[in-house]
Amino acid sequence: MQGLRSLSTKAFLRRKIGMNQKHERSEPSSPQATDDYGLRATGRSEPTTGLRQSLSWHHLVGVSFFAVCGGDYGIEDSVGAGGPAFTLIGVVVLPVIWSLPIAVMTAELGAMIPETGGYIVWVHRAFGVFWAQQNAVWSLVSNTFDNALYPVMFVDYLYWFPALRLTGLLRWFVSVLMLAAVTLLNLVGVDVVASASNLFAVLVISPFVALFVAGVTMIQPSTWAQGLDFPTGEPPVRWGAFLSVLLWNTSGYDSVGALAAEVHDPGRDFPRALTVTILLVTLVYLLPLRVAITLDAEHVRDWSDGHFVRVASDHVGDWLAAWITLGGALSAVGLLNTLLCTSARVAVSAAKLHILPSALARVHEGSGTPRIATCCLAVVLALACALPFSKLVSISMLFYGATTFMEFLALIRLRHLEPLTRRPYRVPLERGWLVAMCLPPMSLCILLVCLAPWEAWLLFGASALLGILASLRTSDACPSWCVQFTKITGISPVSPYGTLVTSAVRANQLEQTCKDDLTDQCSTVIAGPLMPAQPLIEIEIAPAAPNIGLGQSRDFVSFL
């Protein structure tokens, strides 16, 4: 049994068998030359779902920044729960043992499988339909709770201004207006979302830069060590809240994988953008925290959400407090802008897995965005804005821990199942060291699950049941061409599309079989040899219909 490998560079010989003359003479409509399987001349598989490859690494920086933190807002709870010392240590250590593994996992799998839906597709390819459906349901639940929080946060931050202290129906209406504005941005195009994210990132970071400049001359490093000696009389460390908040504020890099089909060069852009984002997020947390802890050293264990505003008001001036407050409102807009974009792509994958209606998988031809999925999510969020969300952060962290655990398992399993598959970016570790890298974040995922409240477990059980019901109604039957291919060749694929790595003699036999007996049913693309002096040939087997290409299904399988 040989490993898998997707079609590689243009150095490979490619021949299409069984395509009619009309298709052979037709010219692709896109500026870049593509063949009937959605394969670009560069050798990268081109999605045929209508999404546009309009994102470069600098676009991804803004998107991933808001997928992870969106500024220092929310990190204050970790100071109140664990103290300054443990918080500052966590801000430095967690990017290494938590954020970096998630980022490089996203870079490898997103470049290897540049498809809409990201982690849904990764789990599908590694473990099949059942676990992909479970993962999709968990992700949808988590994304719904997360995204519905940000319109509420937007109104909460505006409450600092006396003229904007809204209550009742008017408060909900303003939340929905903010949601509507973000939805319109998402309907225009993913490039607009990314550009807006970069602008929001600058606006959100700027007040914390001002805080750092205003207080840098007053820094006292001795205040950063509070809590290390566990002094008597101080409140105990609330480890559950402390770890949940810190992990929450340094997670989310995998969300960017949902945009893989819209990235120019995933093998280059993902690792570059995620590396820059990790450094940016670490500095955005670390520098303002050091200044604020020094300025407010006597009250650090009283810190809670929004405490940066109080520190600015008490020690710098109301002008900076107002600036940070406005930044908090813009942070909520930026977070929702990014996460609505990635969540819509997850909904597209869920629709393809028959969990959601198939109409949600449609992509608008003009804008290249999943408009139906985006609008449906916006309607759900508008209704959810009226609900209380005090416990939903801890609830959603259970689901996030479960989905991230599955993603790491998919990374490890695909390294085992598909060692020859082309990876434009590959984590530079062999399998044993790769497993060692994954163990710390996977352990933290288990910890998040264990820290979840009982309400989260009830919801998790209901979501798992929904995933099981979705799997029961999914048909795994092969299309007619696949059945006929199996009957004639004696090879039984476990999915409708496959990669066959075999000898040159066997490849020629199968090619002739498809040419003679399956002209109207399927076609083959031969690429080989895979490496110099290696007598192996790779065959892509796909339907002859030009509207069904490799970009629509990456369920590659191997044969003897």
Image (spheres, grey):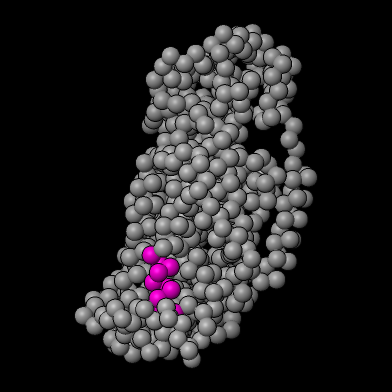
Which residue occupies 48% across, 69% down?
246
Q: Which residues are magenta?
A: 83-92
Is 496 colored magenta in this rendering? no
- Residue at 59%, 11% in the rendered image: 506
Q: Quadrant of the C terminus?
A: top right
Residue 78 vs residue 56, the one in the foreground = 78
**Residue at the image position 44 percent from the left and 41 percent from the top:** 429
Residue at left offset 56%, top offset 65%: 146
For residue 473, which quarter of the picture?
Answer: top right
Task: Tell whether 138 sits left or right of 290.
Answer: right
Residue 437 spot, x, y in % from top left: 48, 49
- Toward the viewer: 359 or 435? 435
Expressed as whole percent of the image width and height from the top left, the position of residue 311 reads: 36, 85
Residue 229 spot, x, y in % from top left:
42, 81
Side of 142 relative to 227 (left or right): right
- Residue 216 vertical placement versus 531 (above, below): below
Where is residue 403 shown, x and y percent of the image?
60, 54
User: In this orientation, which residue lies closer to the viewer: 351 or 93?
Assistant: 93
- Whether residue 140 appears in this view of the structure is no
What number of labels is visible?
0
Asked whether 91 falls inside the magenta stretch, the response is: yes
Quarter occupied by the N terminus: top right
In this rendering, is residue 370 above or below 210? above
Secondary structure character of the magenta stretch overall: helix
| In this view, 372 is above or below 175 | above
Q: Is residue 294 left or right of residue 554?
A: left
Q: In this orientation, does residue 556 appear? A: yes
